[in-house]
Each structure stands twice: as C-alpha cells, then as structure tokens.
Amino acid sequence: MQERPPTTVGQFVLALLGTLAMPALVIFMLVKMVIGIQNSRPVDTDPAAANAAVEARIKPVGEVAMKGSGSDAQVAKSGEQVVKEICIACHGTGALGAPKIGDNGAWGPRIAQGFDALVKNAINGIRAMPARGGNPDLSDLEIASAVAYMANKSGASFKAPEPPPAESSKAEPDVTPAEAASSQK
Ligand code: HEC
C-alpha cells in the first residue's frame, strides 16, 4: 500500500467547495425554474377577474342560444340600428371602397342587381365586404333590414322586411326579402 501524502489545506477547501457547490447549484437552478414558471403566468390579483377567468376556462364548449325566447336581447335589431352600429364603419366613410350611404352614384349599379342579390352579397360577403359586415351574430333578417335601410338612403325604394311579431299573434304574413324585393321591382 502506498502511503498517501497528507491532505493539504488547499485540497481540503477544494473538496469542501466541490461537495457543497454542486447541491447549491442544483438548488439555485430549481428555485430559478420555479420563479420562472410563476412569472410566466399572470397573477390573478383581482378576485373578480380570477373568477371570470376560471368561469371562462370551465364553461361548456357549446351554448344553446334560444332565439326569440322572451329576453329583450334576442329581439331583432332594426335596419337603422344595425347600420348605425356596424355597417357605418365602412359604409359611412367609404372605407375599403365601400359604397357610401347616400352616394346614389355608387349605389345605383348595385341597387340595379335587386334586393335579393344585395342581401345575399351582404350575408355571404363580396370582395372587401365581409360576410354579415363581419358580425356573424346578425340574423338574415337584420342584414336584410340593414341593406334596405342603407340602399333606401342611397336612391333605392326597397321595402324593409317585416320582423316577425315578437309576442303578439301573427296578424300579417312575414315578408321575406324575396317577397319584399319582388313587390318593389
Ligand atoms: C369592413 C368594412 C365593411 C363593413 C363593416 C360593411 N361593409 Fe358592406 N361593403 C364593404 C365594401 C368594401 C363593399 C364593396 C365591395 C365590392 O363591391 O367590392 C361593400 C358592399 C356592400 C353591399 C353591396 C354589395 C353588392 O352586391 O354590390 C352591400 C349590400 C353591403 N355592403 C351591405 C352591408 C351591410 C348590411 C353591412 C352591415 C351589416 C355592411 N355592408 C358592413 C365593406 C363593408
């Protein structure tokens, strides 16, 4: 057996550092990692916001919307309302080349296509015109009313489709866009 030279103070300190430094490094990295994970998610400080966030996360994927089931929110908007809330964004200013409301020259050839064609293009979208004005919640009836309102301000004399009576008994038959248009031609 070979005689080992006595351990020097330097070697002792190095060995000590080696054994201590390794776990310290590991702990340091773990702490960094946990802090990093915590910082990567927003802190829900406001309890109301936190609740809303949880509700949004756990809410069912599909929701059944009952149209016309009593609540006022479901009542169809008038053409004027729809235009003033949505369509005006482009049709008020002519943005993206939209025919401006009141610009009979721009509307003339479009109106000549007939009410049905205009409504169809408004529902499906045409060129820079987004489907339903970019608002998929609008019903066909609301779109048709809006088209009639806009076109009538721009030289047409379409008959706005009648909204189905909300609660009262149906006194008159519903006027569909097709009927409204054909009665105007
Ligand atoms: C993001 C802008 C934008 C919004 C919002 C918008 N439109 Fe338009 N719309 C256009 C543009 C652009 C055109 C012209 C498209 C073309 O002919 O190239 C157009 C054209 C039309 C036309 C004529 C289509 C045809 O056949 O010539 C109708 C009708 C119309 N829009 C209805 C609506 C209605 C109703 C709404 C609201 C529900 C609406 N638009 C909202 C941009 C918009």
Image: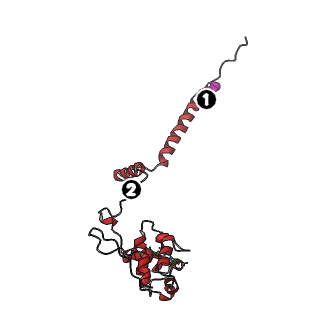
In the rendered image, residue 6 lying in the magenta stretch gets the answer: yes
- In the rendered view of the protein, which quadrant contains the N terminus? top right
How dense is the environment of label 2, judged by Cα within 10 Å: few (below 14), some, or many (20 and up)? few
Tag 2: amino acid: Val
Q: Secondary structure at mark 2?
A: loop
Mark 1 and mark 2 in contact? Answer it, CB < 8 Å: no
User: Mark 1 or mark 2, which is nearer to you?
Assistant: 2
Task: Looking at the picture, tell me which residue is in the foreground, 46 or 110.
Answer: 110
Mark-to-mark CA distance, 1 and 2: 65 Å
Q: Secondary structure at mark 1?
A: helix
Which residue position holds label 1? 18
Percent across and percent down for residue 122 are 48, 74
In the rendered image, residue 171 lying in the magenta stretch gets the answer: no
Q: Which mark is residue 64?
A: 2
How dense is the environment of label 1, judged by Cα within 10 Å: few (below 14), some, or many (20 and up)? few
- In the rendered view of the protein, which quadrant contains the C terminus? bottom left
Q: How is the image coloured?
A: secondary structure
Secondary structure mainly formed by the magenta segment: loop
